[in-house]
Amino acid sequence: MAFADFDSTVFMAPMAGITDRPMRTILAACGAGNLISEMAAVNAIQRKNPKSYQIADVKDEPYPVVVQLVGNNPELFADAAKLVTELGARSIDINMGCPVKKIVNNNSGSALMRDLPLAAKIIEATVNATPLKVSVKFRKGWDNEHINAVQFAQMCEQSGAAYITVHGRTRAQGYSGVADWNIIGEVKAAVNIPVIGNGDVDSPQKAEQMLKQCGVDGVMIGRAMLGNPWLLNRTHHYLQSGEMLQEPTLKEQKEMMLRHLRLLVDYYGERGGIAISRKHISWYVKSLYEAKKFREQYTKLNTLTEAEKLINEYFLRIEP
């Protein structure tokens, strides 16, 4: 394994509004895997916007966290890199792959795949501003007519990136369709720095398949973890030992839901935590009995007491 700084070849994908501190706490409790923050905007960090500053501040977390930055200004990236270094980041990842319209319209995220000179300046400025390792996450290309992942990867390496993550979809695809693992393999063959593959890894077996097929150094798991935080550690364990850990029991699922709910309320306050919990709790129960009915009831709740009561009653009904 080429990642001297990492104990696992399995990485969580940074997801806005999802991979916050409560989610990282849950994943860390499940076992091994590398944790990454939500993306934090460099301009908002510089002016110490409370929400962005909170995202970037990981110094009190008892496990290492990679902090992801997004933006389009090299000077602001340098300033932000210095600040997140002080705020406890394990390393820094630069988001050059986000396909969301408001990010792209700001010439950030995957828009930078169309401006290699600016992307290079951002990477160089970040690398020069911090002693931490700097990585870059990007996509296959802008669309099927503009596939430049290999060229982009080589630019990242030349600009000082310590490692890179490639999502095998174009910006135009968003999260639809099938990820192209061939382009991930082409990127790996074209650079001398470690490469993480991202896209359609939804099981330990799929992770193993990507490692073998693409020759990558690590795998990144995103949406498959929603409602399934055990997946990160189960994948790590399988890749290390060849042993498949058991799926969580209904009791373990209930306990995890309640713990995640309480962490969200502790972190965001009761009103905000309950609102955010609605999507997470819905993901946890998506494959369980009468999930639709439960979700309809849960979305109407506004207090922690009500939420805990409904979850406990639901599992009393469905547990054998």
Image (cartoon, grey):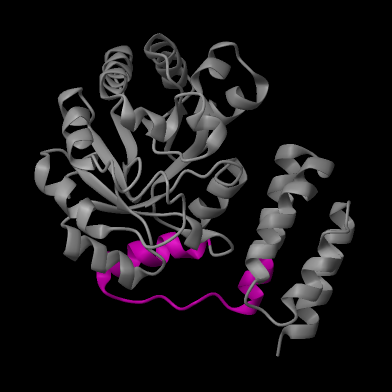
- 26 relative to 37, above or below: below
Magenta region, residue range: 229-255
Q: Main secondary structure of the magenta part?
A: helix
Q: Nearer the viewer, residue 222 or 230?
A: 222
Q: Nearer the viewer, residue 198 or 277?
A: 198
Q: Quadrant of residue 284?
A: bottom right
Q: Nearer the viewer, residue 122 or 152?
A: 152
> Which residue is pictured at 65% across the width and 71% down the height?
286
On the question of residue 8 being in view, the answer is no
Q: Position of residue 37 (x, y in %)?
A: 49, 38
Q: Position of residue 178 (x, y in %)?
A: 37, 63
Direction front: furthest residue = 145
Q: How many marks?
A: 0
Is 43 left or right of 74, judged from the image as shown?
right
Q: Position of residue 196 (x, y in %)?
A: 27, 48
On the question of residue 299 being in view, the answer is yes
Q: Position of residue 59 (x, y in %)?
A: 51, 28
> Which residue is pictured at 38% across the width and 33% down the height?
96
Is 232 inside the magenta-drawn segment?
Answer: yes
